Image (cartoon, rainbow, N blue to C red):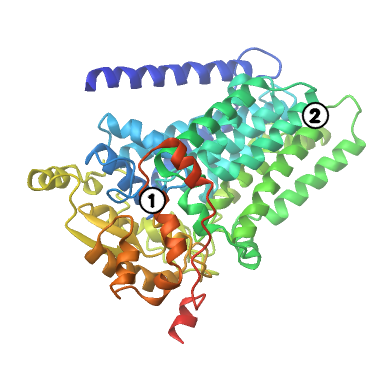
Amino acid sequence: MREPLNRSIRNVVETFVLKVSEMLRNLTCDSRQFPRPSVFEWFCLPLGLFLIFYYAWIMDDAYVYFRYIDNMELLGIGLVYNRGEYVEGFSSPAWAFILAVLRSVGLGYWVIIRGVAVAAFVTFWAALVIINRKLSGTEAGTYIVNFPLINLSLTYGVLCYFTSGLETPLVQVCGVLYACFLLFPGVRLLQFVVGISPFIRHELAIPCLMALAWFVVSRRRIPWTLVITGMVFGILLFVFRIYYYADLLPNTFYLKNETAVARGLLYLKDTVLPYSVHYILPFLALCLAVLKITGRRETGYHMAERAMMVLIGLSFIVYVVKIGGDPRHYRFLAFPYCIIMASTGGIVEALMLRLGLRSSRMAVLALSLILALFTVTRYPRQLDKHPLLPDVHHRPVDEINDAALHRSFRAFSPSPWTLGSEIELGGAVEEFLERHPPNQYVDVIWCPNCYFAYTAFPCQVINGLGLTDPFLARTEMRSERAAHKFGLMPLAEDMVRIRKKYGFRKGAFRTATENGDAPAWVEENLTTIERIEQKVYNEHAFFENLRIAFMRTGRIRLAYTSLDEREK
């Protein structure tokens, strides 16, 4: 069984490599070969990979994915967080699928995370070389600086999120491949990437639709590969969610769908300031405008494509600001940061041409080094010194933390130079299965810590912040910081008491209410709770689940809307 599966995985990998090679052959400006990278572009590749490993870490939320996958792969109880509860408590079906496939061949999570990071960064690097050649309109390597590549391959925030254990490497690669699509819209592989992107994160549905509309308007035809890919994967995901979870959207959407613009603007500021984006982008935009106005008419600056890259990035930023951002520096702005920076390709080269520096190798090298040193020395406001230095101290700024905080917790962020065997549960699971059946749990607990919940695999766990719990996620509650509703934790304590006595089953809350064991908020919202129960404890009957999925569920309403109000 294992050997055929290994062969299948190898075939998938070989096919992927061939497809990427085909893309690199096709995405060229003047030839059918991959553009020859300059010396400094080659330098960015190993340096970026080294820094990715140096900054490697695992975010606490990644252990939500790990618990889902191990419940399926090791315990055999399905793609669930708790036994018998069908709730999609993760944000990226594509990342869950990749983890499941690679986990099935015996790879450890730390190996998977860093392996995906390497593959993603190499693709990222190659796409940025191609983008810059297209936007600079030249193959000549003598005066290639490639500012987007220098910026994106050496910026601390970008490098951190090629790991983290979440779907962010896929999101960042999407950012530059979207830019490639706008420059090479006829390449089918790029159409496929755009079409599949909402499968990576549902927020990418808006950029996907914008890219589709742009293609139809500019080319006056339909990109069938994009459309068919989007429809096929969209239908497959829809059918799976209906059949398995009896829902239309992931649980995280209900939890995070709020309006907190002021907090979202602070989150945008937290990314813009450390990397001087508020200076760099206006300066390069001004330079491009001057070059366009004063340049020769036959010179192509790809203004429409650049503008579309910026518009697609801004559409994503609007959503992030609306929901209040994220409690982690940069993470939710990975896609717009990458695509907007990619839009600046070729501007530095055009300036050098205008200034007569195209043949000066010394000028190119000096400018490249200055830009690289400037970029690599930038770091977030949460750190007291550069993260490459020893004894870095962290403090939250505007309720936003940096990756360095989680990186310092070696319990769940192993050393980047090890196999990460300390976070694997295989042996503990085998010992548990020797004494217990896989569908038996030994206790019911609640906690807001995803790593602790991952290690407590024999227990039914209620996430105190609502990340994986459908009842808490649909409770009206203001967040004290992005995606952190501390007022939900007292409700989680109430649920533990009910679950311990009445179990994880449909009707448990009604029985508790009838016996006088339910708190007031359960009694007052019993109708809504029972509708949610129909989703969570569905019997995988597709048409019945279809009815349940479109059924109006409503929100659980409380007498208080925050932890402070409850304490008062």
Rendered location of residue 150, percent (x, y):
59, 40
For badge 1, the amino acid type reads Val
Q: Which residue is mark 2?
A: 217
Looking at the rendered structure, the secondary structure element under dot 2 is: helix
Q: Are marks 1 and 2 in contact (CB under 8 Å)?
A: no
- Read off the residue under disc 1: 536
Q: Position of residue 245 (x, y in %)?
A: 42, 44
* Left or right, residue 446 beside residue 560: left
The image shows residue 487, relative to residue 287, as above or below, that is: below
The image quarter containing residue 487 is: bottom left
Which sits in the foreground, 539 or 212?
Answer: 539
Q: Residue furthest front?
A: 514
Frontmost residue, 315 versus 376: 315
Quadrant the N terminus occupies: top left
The circle drawn on residue 327 is none
In space, the residues marked 1 and 2 are separated at their CA atoms by 43 Å
Seen from the viewer's position, the closer of residues 449 and 28 is 449
Give the image location of residue 145, x and y in percent.
66, 35
Extreme-left residue of the structure: 435
- Using the image, determine if residue 267 lies above or below residue 295: below
Picture layout, residue 270 above or below residue 48: below
The residue carrying pointer 1 sits among few (fewer than 14), some (14 to 19) or many (20 or more) residues within 10 Å by Cα, namely: many
Q: Is residue 272 visible?
A: no
Left/right of residue 520 with respect to residue 42 in the rendered view? left
| Dot 1 or dot 2, earlier in sequence | 2
Residue 389 shown left or right of residue 125 in the figure: left
Q: Quadrant of residue 93?
A: top left
Residue at position x 38%, y 51% in the image: 536
Position of residue 448 measured from the top left corner of the image (x, y, whole percent): 36, 64
